[in-house]
Image: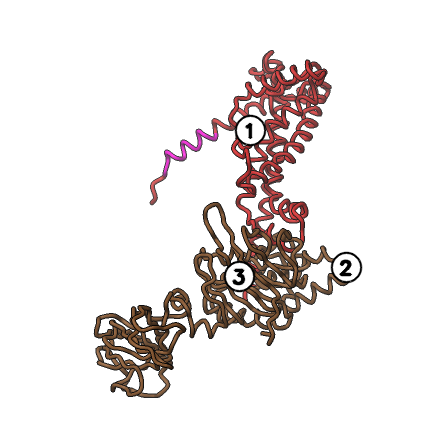
Amino acid sequence: MKRRPWFLFTMLAFGFAFFYIPILSMIVYSFNGSRLATVWGGFSTKWYASLFSNRQVGAALVLSVQIALISATVATILGTMAGLALARFTKFRGRLLFTGMVTAPLVMPEVITGISTLMFFILMADWVGWPGSRGFTTITLAHITFSMVFVTTVVQARVSQSDRAIEEAAMDLGSRPWQVLWDVTLPTIFPAVLSGWLLAFTISLDDVVITSFTTGPGNTTLPLLIWSKVKLGVTPDINALATLIVLAVGAGVIIAGIVLNRAEARRARDERLAYRANE
Amino acid sequence: MPDQPAPFLRIDGVSKTFGTFQAVKDVSLTIAKGEIFALLGGSGCGKTTLLRMLAGFEEPTAGRIWLDGQDMTGVPPWERPVHMMFQSYALFPHMSVAKNIGYGLKHEKLTKDQRMARVREMLDLVQLTPFADRKPHQISGGQRQRVALARALARQPKLLLLDEPLAALDKKLREHTQFELMSIQERTGVTFIVVTHDQEEAMTLADRIAVMDKGQVKQVGAPGHVYEHPDSRFVANFLGSITQFPARVSSVATDRATVEVPAFGATVETGLIPGLAAGEALTLAIRPEKLTILREKPAGLNAIPGEIKDLAYFGKDSLYRVILPSGELISVHAVNAKREDNRPDWYDKIWLGFEPASAILLRD
């Protein structure tokens, strides 16, 4: 008999418990009939009802998603360009400076980025009269700035791995550099671009610190709303909201898993096909 | 090879420097239309850099390249009538075999039907019609190689560059593919330039080869000529096997020279090379298959005494290592043309005979 690695199993159990018991308890308490978040008062779905009737929450969600969509898309375009440049042009004047400037937000404390962005907007407003007020535009700009680096990193890693000869082959067959980018480079790095976009989207969607510095009156994103509500004590409707978010994320992960599994199965089948094609 | 080689491709004093490293040094070559020309050399000899300059991926630091009367300086890769078959094949992974082959055609003024006809013709040429809709990862290595070839030929280039075309194939497939490449070249009439480190590949494929070393072309010629008449120790050694000995010229006559070879403990007769003078120190080289193992000292041939130290019997031929009186070793290759049981054996004292013309005198 093999000795049971009970120590490892115990550690695993504690680890999972540490991760998931809080989430589970939150889901359970979202169905709490009591007004107090920590006292069980019987099963009820009233907090979900109150959540859906809360216009504030709906507006915050819409605002968050809008900002996340726009900032992720712009950050992906800029980040992909930066990633391509860093991976493909190994030598250009100011490369080190460029690398540093692109990746700085990765190591900069968010508070610093938030404050400096705020200062910048205030100074800009003083000098050129823009932005007149802070809100949607300033939040989006700030999100683009700090989520771009994640796209850059993902894309750069992917491009460095890919075979340069593929691009040269396209060029050799008569395509100009722009066409090569469109026909060959982007399709081959597309998975990286997509995951960069998803990363930027999630980062934007749950950001509190930078958003709180760059927002203005009347522009409350969902994380900001939750944050401000929690400051006054955790209410069960926040539990309900968080439960919905967990469900949405869980569904996303499961769908992604299924898609990946299918792709893997298809790849395995293709390989068998190629093997049989061997003379 | 055409009878009158027209200067179809002229490489004129081309050099390429990367930083302080000189990859290609003052290379000049002319290549005729319809020729298969091989650039042969070890890794880092500059052959790939030269090929990339022909494709337009690198600009020469000095010198010019002329193709069919047109100066290629400053012409970007996408405007050159030169296509390349990459060593990794560089197929577009997200496109089917047919799309890969047809990719270059979208830059030509063709109707959709003409384009499809050309793709079909190419698929037929490389016998891949049943695989037209497969993706590159759904076909075998040999098939990928043929897709790469068809893709490069689809636009009917003036010049096709092949970077180690057979390196990624296994041995059995390589032999077969070699002949297929030659037959495709014959049918299409496109000028081929092949870069390879494999001398057998270069010799079987090419009409002419250029042996390169350290960025320079050491020798150019038909495979047979370069093999039999190498003009440097590097080329002699790189192409086939050869044993080399230091030697000194004793005397020069009208049609032959007498050369003293300390390793042989004797003087031998050789052919002439231009400007040979008595007293000159040079290298005498001889290929294993030019030597004959004899029981008796031969008359009318150069003869060196020796003892068999090692032998490998392959059936149709044998390889011997013979130790000379000086203690140096020489390789001998013998074809077992006759059925006999009394072949030279270990420790046999024998004589090695060779024709004066078989000895190669090398200065460089």
Disc 3 vs disc 2: Cβ atoms closer than 8 Å? no
Mark 2 lies on residue: B112
Are there few (<14), some (14-19), or many (20+) residues within 10 Å of tag 2?
few
Query: In the picture, residue B253 is in which quadrant?
Result: bottom left
Quick check: is A49 in the magenta stretch? no
Q: Nearer the viewer, residue B17 or B63?
A: B63
Chain with colour red in the figure: A
Q: Chain of mark 3?
A: B
Q: Amino acid at mark 3?
A: Ser
Residue B20 seen from this side? yes
Q: Nearer the viewer, residue A151 or B286?
A: B286
Q: Amino acid at mark 1?
A: Met
Give the label, 2 or 1, closer to the camera. Answer: 1
Chain with colour brown in the figure: B
Measured Cα–Cα span from mark 3 to mark 1? 47 Å
Name the mark on residue A229.
none
Q: Chain of mark 2?
A: B
Q: Secondary structure at mark 2?
A: helix
Tell me which segment is drawn in magenta.
A5-16
Measured Cα–Cα span from mark 3 to mark 2? 42 Å
Name the mark on residue B28.
3
Dot placed on the residue nearer the N-terminal end, 3 or 2: 3
Quick check: is A7 in the magenta stretch? yes
Query: In the picture, residue A120 is in which quadrant?
Result: top right
Residue occupying image coordinates x 37% and y 78%: B271
Disc 3 vs disc 1: Cβ atoms closer than 8 Å? no
Disc 2 vs disc 1: Cβ atoms closer than 8 Å? no
